Amino acid sequence: KVKKSSDEDRISGLSDDILSEILSLLAIKEAVGTCIFSKRWRYVWTFMHRLEFDSFKDFPSMKSDSFTQMVSQVVTLHKGLNLHELRILFNSHQDNSFPHIHRWIAFAILCGTARIELNLSMFRLLSGFCGHPKVTYAIPPDFFDRKNKAVDDIDHYLKHLDSNSAILISRSGRHFGVDNFFSSVRDLSFTQVYLNDQDVENILSNCTSLERLHVETCSTLFSIKHVYHPLKLKCLELFKCWSMTTLEILAPNLVTFGYRGPKINIFLKGVRHLVDLTVTTPLICLDYPKGISYVLDQFSCYFSQLKVLQMEVEAEKAYRNVPELSNLKLLMFYGEKCSKIENSTLIGITSVIMASPVLHRFELHLFRHKPCTGSGGKLISKGPHKYLKEVVLSGFKGLPIEIDFATYLLDNAIALEKMEIITSYIYLLGRRWCVAENNNEVHSRKQAQLFREGLASNNRSKIVVS
Amino acid sequence: MASSSTSVVVSNKEKENKNTKKVTLKSSDGESFEVDESVAMESQTIKHIIEDGCANNEIPLPNVTSGILSRVIEYCKKHKEAAGESEPSVTSYTSNSTTNPLTEWDTEFVKVDQNTLFDLILAANYLDIKGLLDLTCKTVADMMKGKTPQEIRETFHIKNDYTPEEEAEVRKENQWAFE
């Protein structure tokens, strides 16, 4: 009986390499679940290039003990070859999970994983802060230290793995090693993990291929000073490290810099290629820098080279003399829990828009802002903007001040093609955009539609409400 | 007037010929395809052959049939044309998050039967064309998403050769994946 060619199992004939490429595109549960297909498939998943465990997205109802067991089980069975990325997002701060976390990082180090993300944050923007963690996981002090002579490289990390993984790794010693890690790691991201100054210094000194470093919500980091040897770093992001006092780096390859923290003097030496700047500041404490003025203070010397600028909205006095942002293509403003958005805020924003002659796209993302009582008068036009084509206004509630601003943009941005008005809250979580409901969404959408309807037809066609 | 316009046309043509070096690819079933060298170099494998100076008249590709090769060439041509400037790496919010202008064309390109799809994967792997390999792998991954193991077996005609005991063992080993 001749099998029809359309009934042939061709997928099982593909190599482990190609199949693991395919599995790396699936969620971890589906990918590991392929082990049940047939004998050939039993261990295909153990060759995957990416391992991502997002307890919020993929395992929301899983208890933290089960989550810990699951990740450790995967780490034990995974072959550890060609692992490019390990991403773990998880919010347990019970210290019985800490030995497991050591194991996961030790595994990543020994496999020479290029991209590692460990996010133990308990903060979810709109469900609010879930409470202060009782204990916070801290990176073991010598994990990134090559010079500590008491540490005998592989063995030191092996002791953090369970016996199965340890045997696997020590037997195939050729593939694994701490040297692999330090020269292979390209992207490190730690959120709600304690690192101290020495850890960061070790990372910067020893991880010679490091291109991106992201440290968030780390109150044990005070000072980063690395000015003698130029870093290969292309992207540095320091968010919510409230204890910081010093930041000085020599980073001639830096393209992206993001900062949210205390008002300190920041020295970025030699950053000729910096094109992407994000500086957002909290509104809570008085000592912290307010919005745009801090950015102007610290970074105006880079304004002419920036292509992307992201800042926090603040209610403040209007300011003039914004240095020209002659290369700026994308401008984004965020307003988190603004107590009120006043006219002066929007004048400040429009000053920045007008200082950006080639601006292509503007986005304003507001969330949980309260309506302000006065509107403070109309925004005065400073002349047309010839390039602005796309505008996104999110968290729209139909407040008079938002309407005035949208009208201002429609009147002055003569090249405008599309204005997207979004009533939901949208926010960046790590690198992903998330959407959350604005509790008055029906009302807001109505306001947006009313606004749209009231416009002249040529403007009406530019607006998209969602 | 007439003579000057013809001379303009001629010199343009000369320019064209000088810039487009061609290379011939030969499929496993003996068919030859002449393509611009720059398009052929979308394949890293072919690029290395050319750079090593081993491409005399024809480059034989014994692992790729003519049907598949013509599709691969179509892909490379389309993507070579569209190679534009790089977008800033920042994630700006877009409601339809397509930054690749060829997304629609790519989607149509992979609407093929399974056999062709797997042939394309093997060709993209052999010829080392990253974009095509990523596209075809993603297509297969999408065919697997949201389906039960039995549904996936049926889609791809995978035969379950586990004994009941073995299957139970595998389920136990990765229990969490089956809950």
Image (tube, rainbow, N blue to C red):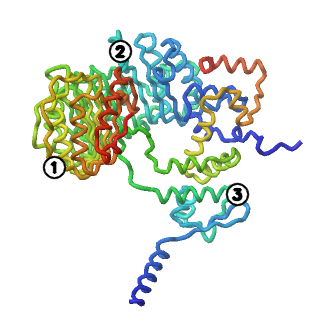
Q: Residues within 10 Å of mark 1 (few under 14, many from 20)?
A: few
Residue at mark 3? B65
Q: Is residue A273 visible?
A: no
> Which residue sits at x=68%, y=27%?
B149
Check the image and name the residue furthest to the right: A1
User: In the image, A359: left or right of A32?
Assistant: left
Say which element carries label 3: loop
User: In the rendered view of the protein, which quadrant contains the C terminus of chain B?
Assistant: top right
**Which residue lies at the image location 37% right of the left edge and 24% below the top edge?**
A442
Mark 2–mark 1 contact, CB under 8 Å?
no
Dot 2: chain letter? A
Mark-to-mark CA distance, 1 and 3? 62 Å
* Residue A88 percent across, percent down from the top left: 45, 24
- Which residue is labeled 1 in the image? A383
How many badges with numbers are in the image?
Answer: 3
- Circle 2: element type: loop
Give the labeled residue for mark 2: A136
Disc 3 crowd rating (10 Å Cα; few below 14, some 14-19, many 20+) is some
Q: Which quarter of the picture shows residue A213?
A: top left
Residue visible at 27% across and 20% down in the picture: A220
Mark 1: which amino acid?
Answer: Gly
Q: In the shown orientation, is residue A113 left or right of residue A46?
A: left
Disc 3 is attached to a residue of which chain? B
Q: Nearer the viewer, residue A30 or A340?
A: A340
The chain identifier of the residue carrying mark 1 reads: A
Amino acid at the residue labelled 3: Thr
Q: Is residue A448 above or below residue B174?
A: below
